[in-house]
Image (cartoon, rainbow, N blue to C red):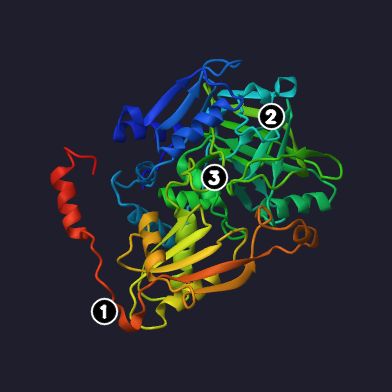
């Protein structure tokens, strides 16, 4: 895997690999809705990376980058794979890489580009950065949508890195919303229970492997920095934010350093914010971050991945790396045989598993195993299993299997399962009662094993001949 030094290294590598048009500089777009609107329009078309500059009211060079992993080709490049790697092979490669991962600790260095500008005291002003208001229903400007929140356990010294949404509330005030029982919230409570403020650093702008690792939720006691080092094949260069014991990437674009007081001492109305489900579901009093220090590079870049409708390939979700591989690994551990691949639609609302049937119970085994995976905030609503001839990365192919291989009276089963607090289908009464349960649907869209060899033949050009046609005609037709 390519060990990208920073976000800028990755963007340059994209243009070197995929062409100059892969990263498009956009001048003059406004932070209020316009950057968000253009991001969404281009994401819907799997368009280029957008690098917004000359934002009205801000110095030239204070930039916002979006759609940074918004296509399969960019995801492949981010993982060090050929840009034309088939989509399911990207997931398979990620599964192999993350499944055989050797943790590599970060490398502490004395200095780095993030220290080009160090602002403290009266100079602290988070509003110096063009944080966008992404959607018109958002309750504020969100500087953190693909950020890294760094905390350290006061008992063990364990450094946790997670991704949470971060909103701007003033020159030296931010809010952070921790969904569910996340590690950072548990660490913060250790400080709060002792009557102390929780030290925190928020990293805004980093390479895609760091972004991916921060969203992976490593086991308690394992730092996401170590995961990122293993994925990169070398340790992440970090430095201690001045005056703290919080390690931050030496090549980060922006780091906001401060402390979180106990919520009963100070909190702020956070949200609403359009979530990845495509709805606004949460707004309330949440912890604040008192920003004491700002570190940033010259010409800093905010890395943005605003949530959009789950059917849109958001900046870091063109290939469902994490949701697909976690389910795939779970199926392997559960003894499900002959799994050909796993794919997620609408982020993870529908999980599709491809198997090669060898017995009459294989499809149901796969469905029950997938349904049994412990979730810490997921919303898998539909679990579907299909035969190996279905291209699970093509929604139309999956729908074809659903429409032609499912007997609604025999092939569909409904169970109850935990869901997440941002689930828009939770009724007000269930929320009030703390009942976070929801039905999930198991769908067997395989050919019935007992007579699968007699199932009507499909009138579709075979994969082998498709590959021949692509090779022969790729210079003439967009194949």
- Earlier in the chain: of badge 2 and badge 1, it is 2
Name the image quarter holding residue 15. top left
Task: Measure the C-alpha gap from mark 2 to mark 1.
Answer: 69 Å
* Horizontal side, residue 252 vs residue 13: left or right: right
Q: State how many labels appear.
A: 3
Residue 454: mark in rendering: 1
Front residue of 25/461: it is: 461
- Circle 2 residues within 10 Å: few <14, some 14–19, many ≥20: many
- Earlier in the chain: of badge 3 and badge 2, it is 2
Pointers 3 and 2 in contact (CB under 8 A)?
no
Front residue of 216/252: it is: 216
Residue 293: mark in rendering: 2
State whether residue 219 is above or below residue 210. below
- Circle 1 residues within 10 Å: few <14, some 14–19, many ≥20: few
Name the image quarter holding residue 201. top right
- Earlier in the chain: of badge 3 and badge 1, it is 3
- The answer to whether residue 15 of the structure is visible from this angle is yes
Q: Which SS class for mark 3?
A: loop
Residue 309: mark in rendering: 3
Residue 105 in the image: x percent, y percent? Answer: 51, 51
Task: Measure the C-alpha gap from mark 3 to mark 2.
Answer: 35 Å
Mark toward the viewer: 3 or 1: 1
Q: Residue at x 56, y 25 (%)?
A: 34
Pointers 3 and 1 in contact (CB under 8 A)?
no
State whether residue 96 is above or below residue 244. below
- In the rendered image, the quadrant that contains the C terminus is top left
Residue 413: mark in rendering: none
Name the image quarter holding residue 287. top right
Q: Residue at x 68, y 38 (%)?
A: 244
* Horizontal side, residue 4 vs residue 310: left or right: left
């Amino acid at each position: 895997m390519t060990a990208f030094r920073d976000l800028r290294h990755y963007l340059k590598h994209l243009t070197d690999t995929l062409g100059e048009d892969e990263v498009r500089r956009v001048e003059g777009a406004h932070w209020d809705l316009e950057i968000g609107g253009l991001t969404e329009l281009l994401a819907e078309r799997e368009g280029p990376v957008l690098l917004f500059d000359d934002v009205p009211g801000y110095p030239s060079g204070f930039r916002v980058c979006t759609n940074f992993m918004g296509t399969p080709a960019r995801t492949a490049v981010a993982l060090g794979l050929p840009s034309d790697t088939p989509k399911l092979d990207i997931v398979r490669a990620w599964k192999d890489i993350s499944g055989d991962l050797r943790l590599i600790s970060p490398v502490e260095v004395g200095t780095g580009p993030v220290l080009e500008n160090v602002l403290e005291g009266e100079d602290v002003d988070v509003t110096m950065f063009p944080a966008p208001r992404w959607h018109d229903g958002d309750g504020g400007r969100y500087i953190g949508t693909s950020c890294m929140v760094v905390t350290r356990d006061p008992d063990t010294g364990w450094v946790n890195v997670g991704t949470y949404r971060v909103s701007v509330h003033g020159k030296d005030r931010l809010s952070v919303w921790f969904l569910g029982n996340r590690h950072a919230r548990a660490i913060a409570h250790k400080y709060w229970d002792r009557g102390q403020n929780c030290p925190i650093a928020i990293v805004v702008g980093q390479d895609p492997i760091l972004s991916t690792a921060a969203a992976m939720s490593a086991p308690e006691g394992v730092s996401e920095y170590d995961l990122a080092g293993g994925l990169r094949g070398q340790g992440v260069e970090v430095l201690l934010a001045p005056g703290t014991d919080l390690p931050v990437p030496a090549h980060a674009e922006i780091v906001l350093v401060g402390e979180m007081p106990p919520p009963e001492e100070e909190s702020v109305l956070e949200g609403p914010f359009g979530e990845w489900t495509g709805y606004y579901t949460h707004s309330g009093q949440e912890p604040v971050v008192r920003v004491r220090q700002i570190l940033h590079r010259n010409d800093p870049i905010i890395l943005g991945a605003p949530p959009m409708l789950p059917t849109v390939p958001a900046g870091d979700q063109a290939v469902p790396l994490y949701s697909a591989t976690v389910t795939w690994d779970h199926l392997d551990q559960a003894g499900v045989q002959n799994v050909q691949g796993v794919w997620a639609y609408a982020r993870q609302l529908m999980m599709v598993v491809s198997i090669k049937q060898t017995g009459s119970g294989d499809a149901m085994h796969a469905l029950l195993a997938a349904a049994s995976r412990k979730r810490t905030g997921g919303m898998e609503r539909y679990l579907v299993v299909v035969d190996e001839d279905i291209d699970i990365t093509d929604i139309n192919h999956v729908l074809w299997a659903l429409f032609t291989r499912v007997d609604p009276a025999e092939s569909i089963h409904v169970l109850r399962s935990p869901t997440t607090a941002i689930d828009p289908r939770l009724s007000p009464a269930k929320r009030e009662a703390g009942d976070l349960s929801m039905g999930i649907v198991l769908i067997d869209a395989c050919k019935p094993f007992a007579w699968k060899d007699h199932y009507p033949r499909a009138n579709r050009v075979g994969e082998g001949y498709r590959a021949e046609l692509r090779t022969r005609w790729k210079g003439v037709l967009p194949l």
